[in-house]
Image (cartoon, rainbow, N blue to C red):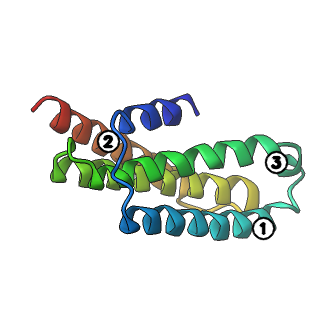
């Protein structure tokens, strides 16, 4: 979670211009998150391990949501290069996908190849984020 907080801070060094497109993007991400979280929660409620961790998982999921929104809004910031914004956006989405795989595999039902795909998407996400940040701030 500390990594997500660091990304949120790093991506928000300058705030995006609040345009209707940015507001629509934020709302779309939020409603998509609500749908995703509700689906995962419904499937996970039968798992006793999930029920004991529900509040920390909600907080963690909200932090992930803020990180993804922060990464996606770099596309609307003047100090971010377009290629770098695409890299951090893709990296954040891969990171999110890795966490969704983890949640499904751990709390809903085991997925046969989840271990491999969690690692691949997590590592590719981290690499994309780092490449995007280096591309923007080394220029």
The spot of residue 54 in percent (x, y) is: 82, 48
First reached walking from the N terminus: tag 2 or tag 3: 3
Calculate the distance from the C-alpha at mark 2 to the C-alpha at mark 3: 28 Å
Q: Which residue is mark 3?
A: 54
Q: Secondary structure at mark 1?
A: helix
Q: Quadrant of residue 105?
A: bottom right
At a point 33% along the width and 37% down the height, the residue shown is 14
Q: Secondary structure at mark 3?
A: helix
Calculate the distance from the C-alpha at mark 2 to the C-alpha at mark 1: 30 Å
Residue 43, disc: 1
Q: Which residue is mark 2?
A: 129
Is residue 59 at least partly visible in the picture?
Answer: yes
Determine whether, in the image, residue 137 is placed left or right of residue 53: left
At a point 63% along the width and 48% down the height, the residue shown is 62
The spot of residue 40 in percent (x, y) is: 71, 64
Calculate the distance from the C-alpha at mark 3 to the C-alpha at mark 1: 13 Å
Instruction: Work out whether residue 107 or residue 55 is closer to the camera in this orientation and state it.
Output: 55
Determine whether, in the image, residue 39 is placed left or right of residue 33: right
At a point 48% along the width and 45% down the height, the residue shown is 67
Q: Tell whether label 1 touches label 3 (CB within 8 Å).
A: no
At a point 23% along the width and 39% down the height, the residue shown is 131
The spot of residue 86 in percent (x, y) is: 25, 55
Sort mark 1 into few (<14), some (14-19) or many (20+) by Cα contacts within 10 Å.
some
Q: Secondary structure at mark 2?
A: helix
Q: Tell whether label 1 touches label 2 (CB within 8 Å).
A: no
Instruction: Work out whether residue 88 or residue 52 is closer to the camera in this orientation and state it.
Output: 88
First reached walking from the N terminus: tag 2 or tag 1: 1
């Amino acid at each position: 979670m500390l990594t997500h907080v660091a990304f949120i801070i790093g991506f928000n060094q300058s705030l995006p211009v609040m345009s209707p497109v940015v507001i629509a993007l934020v709302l779309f991400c939020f409603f998509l998150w609500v749908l995703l979280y509700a689906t995962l929660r419904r499937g996970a409620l039968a798992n006793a391990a999930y029920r004991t961790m529900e509040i920390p998982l909600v907080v963690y999921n909200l932090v992930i949501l803020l990180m993804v929104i922060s990464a996606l809004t770099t596309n609307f910031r003047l100090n971010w290069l377009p290629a770098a914004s695409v890299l951090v956006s893709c990296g954040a989405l891969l990171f999110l996908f890795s966490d969704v795989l983890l949640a499904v595999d751990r709390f809903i039902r085991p997925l046969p190849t989840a271990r491999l795909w969690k690692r691949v998407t997590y590592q590719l996400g981290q690499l994309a984020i780092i490449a995007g940040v280096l591309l923007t701030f080394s220029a």
